[in-house]
Image (spheres, rainbow, N blue to C red):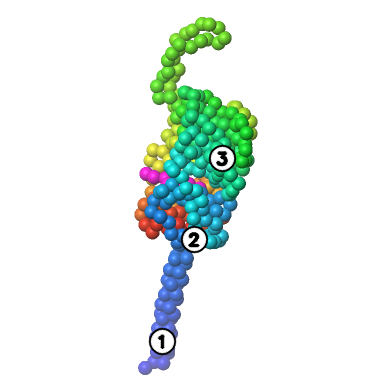
Amino acid sequence: MDRSATEQTRARARAIALAAVGAGLCFVIGVAWWLRSGPSPVLAVAPGTRLLAMSHGRLYWLERTCTLWRAEIDDGRVTAEPLEPILRRRECTPDDPRFDSDVIYELSGLGQVVRDSPRQRSTVLERNLLYALALDSRYLYAGNCAQADNCQIERLPAEDNPGDPLLIQAGIHALANIEVDQTEIFWVDRGRHKPICGNETIGDSNVVEYRCHDPVPPRLMAAKKDEPRATERVVLTDFDGRRPLLGARHVYWLGAGGVHRVAKAGGASQLVLPTRALSGFAADGNDVFFAADGGIFRARDGEAVRPLHRTAGPPRGLAVDADFVYWIDTDRNALVRQRR
């Protein structure tokens, strides 16, 4: 037999064996990376639990029994167990609570804004028809519709004893929800579907005339938040959502067909995520995250939305910190996390 041919055959066999080993090793490494990069459980929760927010290293969630829970998070893990509910309520609030470290603000359902802090639990505002809350680093904003066709937004210091509120906006036809960023306040005015007609006194005279006011389409509105009754502007007419969700430069909402986006400065709207449900939203810097029908999605604010993790159904709530995304896995009844 030709010795050189035999050596070539052996060399080919060794090369094939090494390639097979290398492929197997790559497969094992790939599986290990996939397992590490996928969602991992943080904490078991009760069925029906909804994740609400992350604030100053604390995760907050609401159980179906309307008990509010909190856990300290360090490097994506709970630092101490077992946990006890921090707030037991007689009824679930009509809007999401707002969190600032140890302080919780919520609508009581009885026309009150309640502030729960380590020092005291107190009512900071009472109105007949309170609709929405927003919170920044200094102030709490509350919307109410006690007067017909004249909903208002008031502001008060985020303190234990804030004093009298300051009127920020008024003359809103039908307020739905409000949010604030560093410079502006955004709100949804659902408008008027039908004309309103009636007798009106003209100016300061005693002359009374019968007048009709045309219907007003639903709109997304904005105004500077650092001064009372600042000039308002229309961000988008024919707005089909109920709650504005703020990214760094865009406003998002769930509307017809899915999640839409419009620039805060105004302009045309864009459908960015076709979905039937939006169960969570979070923004951090230039990144935005969505819990929607089919899983967790993310995007750079203003860019294309991409899947982060697919699920069989919508996760219940969403929160983020510098390293992880958190949500409630309804199949496992667990709070889970995944690296961003």
- N-term-proximal mark, 1 vs 3: 1
- From the image, give the main secondary structure of the stretch colored magenta: strand
Decide: marks 2, 3 in contact (CB < 8 A)? no
The label shown at residue 180 is none
Three-letter code, disc 1 = Arg
Looking at the image, residue 38 lies above or below residue 218: below
Amino acid on which the number 2 mark rests in the picture: Pro
- Up the image or down, 14 lies above or below 137; here it is below
* Place of residue 71 in the rendered image (x, y in percent of width and height, measured from the top left): 52, 56
103 relative to 229, above or below = below
Residue holding disc 1: 10
Q: Mark 2 highlights which residue?
A: 82
Front residue of 281/310: it is: 281
Give the magenta part as a residue range: 276-282
Residue at x 53% of width, y 6% of height: 206
Q: Distance between the residues labelled 2 and 1?
A: 62 Å
Q: In this view, does 290 lie above or below 14?
A: above
Q: Which residue is drawn at 55% across and 7% down?
A: 205
Res. 218 image quadrant: top left
Task: Point out residue 96 in the picture as x, y percentages from the top left corner.
Answer: 48, 42
